Image: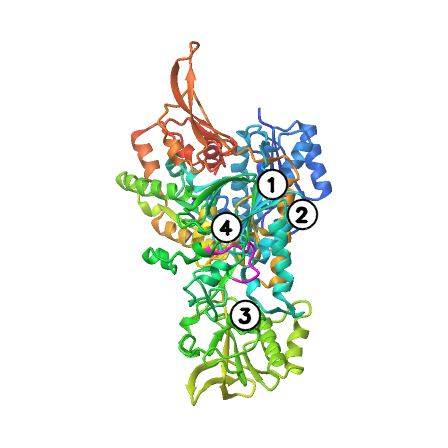
Amino acid sequence: MSETFEPKIIAFVCTYCTYAGADLAGTSRLKYAPNVRLIRLPCTGRISPMFILKALQKGADGILISGCHPGDCHFTHGNYHARRRWMVFRSLLDFMGISTERVKFSWISAAEGGKFADLINNVTEDIRKLGPFDQYKELIRETEAPATL
Amino acid sequence: MAKIGVFICHCGENIASKVDCTKLAAAIGEHPGVAVSVEYKYFCSEPGQESVKKAIRDNNLTGVIIAACSPRMHEATFRKVCAEAGLNPYLCEIANIREQCSWVHTDKDMATEKAMDITRSMIEKVKRNNKLQPIEVPVTRRALVIGGGVAGIQAALDIANAGQEVVLVEREPSLGGHMSQLSETFPTLDCSQCILTPRMVEVAQHPKIRLLTYAEVEHVDGFIGNFKVKIRMKSRYVNRDVCTGCGDCMVKCPVKKISSEFDCGLGKRTAIYTPFAQSVPNIPVIDKASCIYFKNGKCKTCMKSCQINAINFDMQDEFIDLEIGAIVVATGFQIQNTAGYGEYGYGKYPDVITGLQFERLATASGPTSGKILRPSDGKEPETVVFIQCAGSRDPSKGVRYCSKICCMYTAKHAMLYAHKVHHGKSHVFYMDIRAAGKGYDEFTRRTIEEDDASYVRGRVSKVWLENGKLMVRGVDTLLGRPVTIPADMVVLATAMVPQPNAIEFAKTIGIAYDEYGYYNEAHLKLRPVESSSAGIFLAGACQSPKDIPDSIAQASASASKVLALFSKETLEREPVVASTNEATCAGCWGCVLACPYNAIEQKDILDRSGRIIKSVASVNPGLCQGCGTCVTFCRSNSIDLAGFTEKQIFAEMMAL
């Protein structure tokens, strides 16, 4: 009974800052929770809200979005687009009854390996506290919707 | 039908110790579409690469996954391997199971499970990869060097001497930078002006160099090989094409008591001036803020004295547009404002000066003609106290880093002082002596042993004036007791900090900077002269505090990078670019708003008689940098990004 819940978290990261930061955490041999799977994108500007919805639908318990710090975007302002999109999207999530706590947004630069490791640990802990994300699954069961899981 | 080859690398023990590679290979072998799933100790080794090539040929693979280190490490290596085996290189993907799995996790089962997820996800992606061809873009063979200090001069000369065109932009009226202000340079004590001015003249006379002084970079657009740069030529009010540099105007100018920036406030200049006698170009500028004519509309004395009518008070700033292939940023440093150190009395006592001011006193072309004289009364100081680390290595009030040059220049100052004032006595307060460099430690030893400078290891807590003496209270940590030295002059080795507008400028040209405002190199060890943006290189103290030899070495390294770029007429770019689906594009132009590079244009689709049927968005692959912001913006899913298509990303996600 004491088995801890291991959440499944999907991270969408940009290749220039956060992916490089994650690599730095690796080369520095920092240790962090193994619950997060990274999806590498050229820029956070490439992240569509559809990715987040699909990941949640597919069974992710939490989502992490991370890119370059404001002002440091390799593509000058892709991360500003991402930030604005997220501000709009989070109210939509809230409206749908999905806790915005499940979707985290952060900035990690290529030099912040330590911060990356801390972030992964914190996000994992936070999502673990929220518990598994069953809303979709329940909804699909109830409505017998033919959505693919 | 997909035939994917998965190659799982042990990386010695780096991966194999935390990920059960045999189990991984077996599990992946079961995955639909996987034709080959093998493990090996080092796939990046020669036999490893050969085995990948053989597997591609023998099995007619349609995609390759290398489950190994980060794509930032070996993606290029394995794409080349694929290309050599006849497979399109963009059908190769890397599953990062080292940096982001084996190195960061301790539980072997969990790590193996994660490695499986990562690999499966990449398999699903690579199944949907398209064959891509690299994009060739032309290279404009003209370099822009920003900053005319010693680093900028070196970079410009190196590039120009190799036969390529250079535009050198300097915002001050003359070339020279900080080095032109120095007296003699460590560790050889050769006079700074003597070694620098011939190079300044060489720049001005070089047929391949276009020198733009009193000019600033206003705007940078474009990308590697194809930058578009706008330069503001600030109005000098002196026609640079006709002025002969005779200097009559400066003699006649009635405003003579402006504190000279070049002499760090120790000398005076006129309102129409050249910063120093050896200025290149030797063409004066009018300081609009101090000129009487600009203040109250009367004077024009300089205009009357000019025999060739070179002075024009109606001159306006001009703009020059340049096409540039590569940029070298050599914008230099400034010294920290010492006003925060009230305890040292800088600004309060005129005889407490900075190291740069001491340089001006010690130089033969300076305000005292090379005599060490106190600014307050013009007397020769009998005792001088030098305080090192006045701002450096001080996290509470100054900067955390070491400014690197202060130990050496303070030793040089003490030495020059001993040579010029024979009966003088110098004391140096230091934290550590950091004299690493060719001939550097010998130099500091010489100051201590031959020139009798007394070095005191400790910090200074206070400087105050008592009976005409500057009392310096500090601690000698080696003897463990406080010391008070009555001095005639105190010299502060102030910290080097980035230029005041360094961060703003970094944003203008689009390069990354650190917490202080120094410009970031692409990799601290492996790519020390490249900035975060392709085609923009760094030289000198704009990257970190540096002495002259280091600045010159970095400038030459930058120049060689520029020349390597210019050695070909075109350069190959990753084909990660967006493209539109003209059939579904509704022409809302949302993507145009989203694009940071103005790479999306309007394209009219015409019918047979030439009438416009509709207008759609069209991506210019030469300008597109592949960020994908437009893809997310598109309401009708009419744009996709090669290499990161919607299909690929969704597939990647579905496999997790």
Real-space Cα distance between discs 2 and 3? 33 Å
The residue mark sitting in front, 3 or 4, is 4
Q: Secondary structure at mark 2?
A: helix
Compare marks 3 and 4 and give the one earlier in the sequence: 4
Q: Chain of mark 4?
A: B
Amino acid type, mark 2: Asn
User: SS at mark 4?
Assistant: loop
Q: What residue did someone put label 4 on? A: B308
Amino acid type at circle 4 is: Ile
Left or right: residue B122 versus residue A122 is right
The residue type indicated by label 1 comes to: Glu
The overriding secondary structure of the stretch rendered in magenta is: loop
- The nearer-to-camera label among 4 and 1 is 4
Looking at the rendered structure, which numbered label has been put on residue B161?
A: 2
Element type where label 1 sits in the image:
helix
Where does residue B362 sit, x and y in percent of width and height? 57, 73
Say which residue appears at 28% left-offset and 38% top-offset: A96
Give a yes or no on whether discs 3 and 4 share a subunit. yes
